[in-house]
Image (cartoon, rainbow, N blue to C red):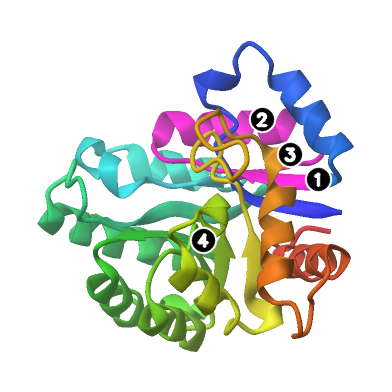
Amino acid sequence: MLIDSHAHLDDDRYDQDREATLARAQEAGIEALVTIGCDLATSRAAVELANRYANIYATVGVHPHEVKHIGDDWYDALRRLAQHPKVVAYGETGLDYHYNYSPPKLQRERFREQVCLARELKLPIVVHTREAQEDTVAILKDEKAGDVGGVFHCFSGDQWLANEALDLGFYLSFSGVLTFQNAATLRDIAKTVPRDRLLVETDCPYLTPVPHRGKRNEPAYVKLVAEKLAEVRSGMGAATLEEIGRVTSDNARRLFKIA
């Protein structure tokens, strides 16, 4: 059994077959998944999905792309949403200097605010960082994010970032990127992560793993990520699909306090 620790199941690309998508996930051995809020609307949608399905959990938060849209009432609304018993983390939030859809200075300000909000809510933080790893780590340290912990989702940084994240007490989550031909460095990093800090995710509908790359991703494909992680870590602890499934699911339950 596996847990997809990061999905965007509210995405309109599932509107025509969401039930079938969930059925395929169950058939593939996916026992639970966490669907992610990226702004106020998607946070509400994530909570609605978690309320509707027993095996879906939710997060609330604002993605760095979207922080320019934060209104005066957003944080209070997110506080209210976070009271739902199936909200298990805050995020995804962080910094993304690749596209700069929101200005970098504003991203940093809003990231600080959201780390403080996560600490207030006593929720672990789902971190998104792209081409901003030094600033991301600095803010997490400044704002004492280690008090609540969290996960660097879709980890794609270097060994320095992996070490810093682990030192902060965070988990590292690996996605379909691990299966990409040009991800040799990432696979080397995956070998260095302690087994009790490993998670797997799809980030669906994005980052579809090989051999389905180019198609819409879905939670069932987290099994392909787990298989690659098992292959990468062969000769170490947690080196079969069954062991990776058990270890990463135990880790997800511990981080997100999923029974």
What SS does tag 4 mark?
Answer: helix
Determine the image quadrant of residue 88. Answer: bottom right
Q: Nearer the viewer, mark 2 or mark 3?
A: 3
Q: Which residues are magenta?
A: 32-58
Q: Which mark is residue 121?
A: 4
What SS does tag 1 mark?
Answer: strand
Residue drawn at (32%, 37%), measured in percent from left and top?
73
Q: Is residue 33 magenta?
A: yes
Q: Nearer the viewer, mark 1 or mark 3?
A: 3
Query: Closer to the N terminus: mark 2 or mark 3?
Result: 2
Q: Which is nearer the eye, 191 or 68?
A: 191
- The three-letter code of the residue at mark 4 reads Leu
Count residues near mark 1 (Cα–Cα under 10 Å), then give few for <14, some for 14-19, many for 20+: many
Whole-Å distance between the Cαs marked 4 and 2?
Answer: 21 Å
- The three-letter code of the residue at mark 3 reads Ala
Q: Is residue 88 magenta?
A: no
Q: Are marks 1 and 3 in contact (CB under 8 Å)?
A: yes
Where does label 2 land, which residue?
Answer: 49
Q: Which mark is residue 30?
A: 1
Q: Are marks 2 and 3 in contact (CB under 8 Å)?
A: no
Query: Closer to the N terminus: mark 4 or mark 3?
Result: 4
What SS does tag 3 mark?
Answer: helix
Whole-Å distance between the Cαs marked 4 and 1?
Answer: 28 Å
Q: Which mark is residue 220?
A: 3
- Residue 149 x/y as whole percent: 53, 74
Whole-Å distance between the Cαs marked 1 and 3?
Answer: 7 Å
Q: Which is nearer the eye, 139 or 18?
A: 18
